[in-house]
Image (cartoon, coloured by chain):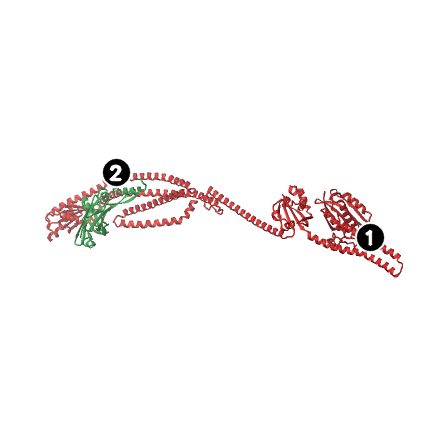
Amino acid sequence: MKLLEGFHRRRRDFRFILRMVAVLLVCLTAVFYLLQKSRDLPTLLVANRVLLFILFYINVVLILAVLFVLARSIFKLLLERRARILGAKFRTKLLLTYVGLSLVPVLVMFVYANVLLQQSVERWFAAPVESVLKQGSAVAENLLRSSEQATLHDARVIASDLAGLELDRPRQRARLDRRLQPALVREDLDFLGVYREADFVTAVVDPDAGLGDLPEPHRAMLLEAATGGEAAQPIPPPRGEGQLVLAAVPIPGSVPPGGVLVAGRLLPPAVANQTSQLIAAYQQYRQLETQKPELQSSQVLIFLMVTLLVLLASTWVGLYLARSVTGPIEALAEGTRRISGGDLSHRVEVPADDELAVLVTSFNSMTAELQRSRQEREERNQELSAANRRLDEERDLLVAVLQSVAAGVIAVDREERVFLCNDAALSMLRQSEAEVRDRPIREVWADEERRKLLPLLADGVSDGDDTASREAGRASGSHQVRLVLGGEWKTFEVKRAALRERDGSPLGQVLVLEDLTELIRAQQLAAWNEAARRIAHEIKNPLTPIQLAAERVLRKHQQGQEVGPALEEGVSIIVREVETLKGMVDEFSRFARMPRPQPADVDLAGMVQETVKLYRSVKPGVEVAGEVAPDAAHAWADPEQLRGALINLLDNAVEATDAPGRVDVRTARSDGRVQLVVADTGRGIPPEAKEKLFQPHFSTKGRGTGLGLAIVHRVVSDLHGTIRVEDNAPRGTVFTIELPAR
Amino acid sequence: MPSRLVPVLALLLLRALPLCAAELRDLQPTVVDGRVEVSFQLAGALDDVVMARIESGLPTSFVYRVELLRDRQRWWDDGIAEATLEVVAMYNAVSQEYLVNFKRDGKLVESRLARSRPELESAMTRFERVPLFATSDLRGGSGARFILKARAELGTKTWLYFIPLHVETDWAQSKKFRP
C-alpha cells in the first residue's frame, strides 16, 4: 500500500521524466535514422541499427537511472550516517540487503542467459548450416558459370562464322540477320546481337523466349569483348522471369575492329529462380553472419535492459521499503527530540503500517496525553495563581480593614506566636510592630500589666488540647480588662475567638480589643450626671415634706395657734424623711464602695434553695420555684455578691409578677459556663427600657434608687460573667447570668 | 593508487584499444586550375571482415573527411573548409560484380562497377587528384601555408557487446603547402 501511495505521489514527476526521456529518444532516433538512411543502406540494416540504437539508448538511460538512484541513496545514507540520524544504519543495511539480494541472482541470470545466447548464435552459424548454404550457393554459381561457359562457347563458334565481317558495308549489315537466325536456331540460343564496341548493330531474338524487349548488355562487358577479351554475365531479362546469360566475344577480323558478338541464353525460370534463391539465401546468411556482433549486441542489450530494469525496480523497492520502515522511526526520533525540547504540540504524521502504525499512534496518544496534562497543570497553576492573587487581595483588603477599624486585633497561631496585629491594637497596648510581630505572645505581654490579658487566651490552643480549645472557642465572651499603660488607666473590652481550619483543627486565636476607656469615662460622666440629677431629685423629694412641715409649724406659731400637734406631726415627717435620706446615702455609699470580689466555689444548689425559700410566701398567688441542674450545681464566683445579685433579681421578679404568677430560678450549663436564670411571668420590660436597664439610677418602678440592677451588672462583670435580659414566653422577663464554671 | 586516477586510466586504456588497424597514407594536395585536388590511399582497410561484409551483399561504406586548414605558428591551425567523400560498395552475387558509388558531400558523383577484389580495393581506397576544394578557399594572404588533414570512418563496432564505437583511422596530415 505504501509503495502504491508513494508511486501515486510521485507519478507526476515520473510522468514528466518519462516523457522527457521518450521525447529525447524519438528525436535522437530520428536523427540516427536520417544519418543511416543517407548512407544508402538497405531498410533492414537501417532498422537493425535503429533498433540497436534504441536499445542502447534505453540501456544507457537505465544505467544512468540505476546509478543515479544508487548514488543518490548512498550519498544520502552517508550524510545521514555522518549526521548520526536515527535509522540511517538500519536503512543502509536494508538497502544493501535488497540490492544484494536482487543484484546477485540478476547478474547470474544475465551472465548465464548471455552465455546461452552466444552459444545459440554460434550454433545458428555452425558448420552444417553454413556448409549447406555455401554448397547450394556454389552449385547455383557453378550452374551459372557453366551456362556462361556454354554460351561463351556458342558465341565463339558463331563469331568464327562471322569472321571478317565488314560492319561498315550496308549490304553485309542488311544480310547479317539472315546469317544470325540459323545460328540462333542451331545453337539453341535466345538472343544473338552484334555490336560495334558498345554500339548496337543488329540482333535476332527467339520469339518463343518471351523476352519482349532487347536485353542491354553492360557497357563494360561490350568494351571488354571489343578489346579482345571475353565476358559473360547473367542479367535479368527485360521482361519475364529467369536469368538471361549473356556472353560477349570479339568477332575475329571484323572491319573495322571492335566487332562484338553477344549471345544470350535464357535459363528456365524455375532453374533461374532456384539459382537466385540459393545465392540469395547464402547472401542473407552471410549478411546475418556479418551482423552477428550486432545481433549479439542487440540480445545483450535486451538482457541488459531487463537486468537493469529488475535492478532498478529492486533498488527502488528496497529504498522504498527501507524508507517505509525508517521513515516512521526517524519521525518518532524527531518527535521525541521535539517533545523533549518542550514542543508537546508536535505529532508524528508519517503514514505507517502494522506495528509501526501502532507505535506511531501510541506515540501521538502519549504526546496528546502529555499536552493535555500540561495544559491542565497550567490551568491549575493559573487558577492557583489567581487564587493566590485573590487571597493576597483579600488579605490586603483584610489588613486594610483591620488597619482601618478602631478595634485592636491580635491573632496568634497555635504556638501562640503573633502573626497579626493591627495598628489600633499596637496603639492601644502602646507597643510597636517590631515588638509584636512573629513573637510569642507570652513574651510580648511579659510585663505585669499586659500579662493580665494572657488569661483570656485559651490554654488548650497551644498545647493541642482540642476539646479545651473548642470549649474555649465557644466560650468566646467579652471581658473588660483594666490596665495601666503609660501611667494611664485603660479599660478594654476583650473578645476572644478561636481560629480553626475547615476541618475544625485549631489554627490559633484572635483577640479583639475595644478601648472602653473614653466610653466608660463618658458613661461615668453621664451616670454621674444622672446620679446627681436623681440624687438632687431624691433629696429634693424628702426636703419638700420637711420644708412643708417646718413652714406649717412656723405658720401655726406665727398665727398663735396650738403648735404642739403640728410640731409633733412635723417632727415626725422630718425624722422620717431624714431617715429616707440616710438610707439613700447608705445605698450610694455601698454602690460606690463595692468590695473586690473574692471568687470561690459556690454551691449554687444550696444558694438557690435558700433564696427561693425566702420568697415562697412573700406574695400570695405567686409561686416561686428553684431547680438546679446536676452539671450546673457549682460556679466560680464571690458567694455573697452572687447571693445579693440573685436576691435583687428575685425581688424584682416577685414584685413585677401579679397573682397568679410564677417565678422560676434554675441553673444550667452551656458552652462550658454556668447559667443562673431567673424567669417570671410578670409585666415584662419594654424594649426601650432594656437598653438602660443596667444603668445606675434607672428604674421602671418609679421608686427606689435605681441602683439594684446596676449593682447586679457590676457584680457579674467583676466575676468575668455576663448578664442579659430577654422576654419570657408567653409573658414576663428572663434574666440570665453566665459565670465561669469551676 | 589514488582512486581518482582510475577513470583516467580506464579512458586511456579504452583509447588504446586497437579498434582500427587501417591507416590513411600519402595525403597530398595538388593546386591546379583553381582547384585543390587531393590524393590519398587507405591501407589495411579491406581486411577479411570487411570483405566478408561486402560480399555478403551489405552496402559497406567508407567515409573520408578531409579538412583544409591554414597553418599557424605555435597555435592551433585555422580550419578553412572541409569535405566529405563517401564510398559505398554493394556486391551482386549473381553477376559477381561490385557496384561502387562515390558521394561528395552527400551527393552522388560517380558510380563504377568492379569485377574483382583488386579493382574494388582500388576503387574504395585509392584516390588520385580528387577535386575537393577551390583555390578560393585558400585565403589568408600570399604567404600563408595550408595543410590537409584527413581521416576515414570505416563503420561502427560494439565493445563488450553493447557499447557502440566508431571505427576510424587517425588523422593523416599532408605537408604544408602554398597555393
**In the image, residue A75 above or below residue A536:** above
Residue type highlighted by circle 1? Glu
Depth order, front residue of B127/B76: B76
Q: Nearer the viewer, mark 2 or mark 1?
A: 1
* Residue tagged 2: A127
User: Dot 1 lies on which element?
Assistant: helix
Q: Is any part of residue A234 visible from this angle? A: no
Instruction: Please state if B150 lies on the left or on the right of A515 as rendered.
Output: left
Instruction: Please state if A594 lies on the left or on the right of A232 as rendered.
Output: right
Chain letter for green? B
Instruction: Please state if A215 lies on the left or on the right of B10 as rendered.
Output: left
Depth order, front residue of A634/A66: A634
User: Dot 2 lies on which element?
Assistant: helix
For marks 2 and 1, give the CA distance.
Answer: 181 Å
Residue A258, given in percent of the width and then of the height, sits at 12, 49
Instruction: Please state if B81 lies on the left or on the right of A474 as rendered.
Output: left
Q: Looking at the figure, which quarter contains the N terminus of chain A?
A: top left
Depth order, front residue of A389/A728: A389
Tell me the quarter of the picture where residue B52 sits: top left
Tell me the quarter of the picture where residue A131 sits: top left
Chain letter for red? A
Count every numbered label the image shows and give the total: 2
Residues beneath discs 2 and 1 located on the same chain: yes
Residue type highlighted by circle 2? Ala
Instruction: First in sequence, mark 2 or 1: give its number.
Output: 2
* Residue tagged 1: A579
